[in-house]
Image: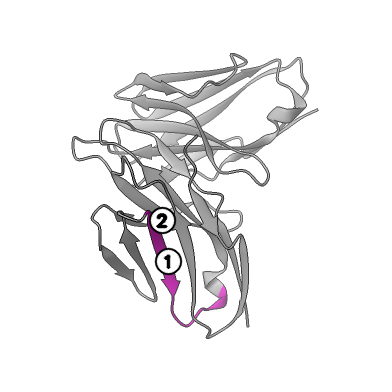
Amino acid sequence: ILNVEQSPQSLHVQEGDSTNFTCSFPSSNFYALHWYRWETAKSPEALFVMTLNGDEKKKGRISATLNTKEGYSYLYIKGSQPEDSATYLCALWRSYNTDKLIFGTGTRLQVFP
Amino acid sequence: ETGVTQTPRHLVMGMTNKKSLKCEQHLGHNAMYWYKQSAKKPLELMFVYSLEERVENNSVPSRFSPECPNSSHLFLHLHTLQPEDSALYLCASSQVSTSGGREQFFGPGTRLTVL
């Protein structure tokens, strides 16, 4: 069974705090890693698609790093704001000739004003 | 708006009913997906259609029957469901190419309750 693990399951932080969470995956048969942001009552929305070991991507205050050799990715949020409150999902894409994403259970972030 | 719409947004049905979920994408993508989100579980892939051909069927019971009449539309036909099938059903689309890895665009989901 192929598992994509995310930790922590949930996180409560104060506005202005920086935070980070982890996605772990089997390092064999890696093709790409996706991060999605899922706000309550909305659709999941892609943040990053990462493919290369050592990749670092940034979108505003959110950034992500990738280590394919050890099988993990970190998502960082600098200076959290209440609008960052959402569930953050990572998903593993194992091979270019499959259309299948394997999702983790997500990290639920709550930012208090 | 992600460019992927789903109807209905909420559905309550009895175990003997037949109903269908509809998904439409306005992004010109060539692949569409059905996912199931149950409480405290990861998003589970159910079906994938790539270029209107079903390429993945993730051991889903036959009471769920997908249909992809063209690249913009995807249906999930439901019949004789069980209460444990109650979940959020999400549709997604993507543009799959030889380079792969493209992000998926999700609809808002249909919240299904089976009584």
* Residue that carries the numbered disc 2 in the rendered image: A35
Q: Secondary structure at mark 1?
A: strand
Estimate the spatial distance between the alpha carbons at disc 1 and disc 2, rounded to whole Å. 8 Å
Residue B97 pos. (x, y %):
21, 36
- Residue span colored magenta: A71-82
Question: A31 or B91, which is in the foreground?
Answer: A31
Residue B69 pos. (x, y %):
39, 18
* Residue that carries the numbered disc 1 in the rendered image: A75
Identify the residue at image location x=61%, y=35%. Answer: B8
Q: Earlier in the sequence, mark 1 or mark 2?
A: 2
Residue type at numbered disc 1: Leu
Can residue B102 be seen?
no
Residue type at numbered disc 2: Trp
Asked whether B92 falls inside the magenta stretch, the response is no
Image: A101 above or below A37:
above
Q: Are marks 1 and 2 in contact (CB under 8 Å)?
A: yes
The coloring applied to the image is one colour
The quarter in which the C terminus of chain B is drawn is top right
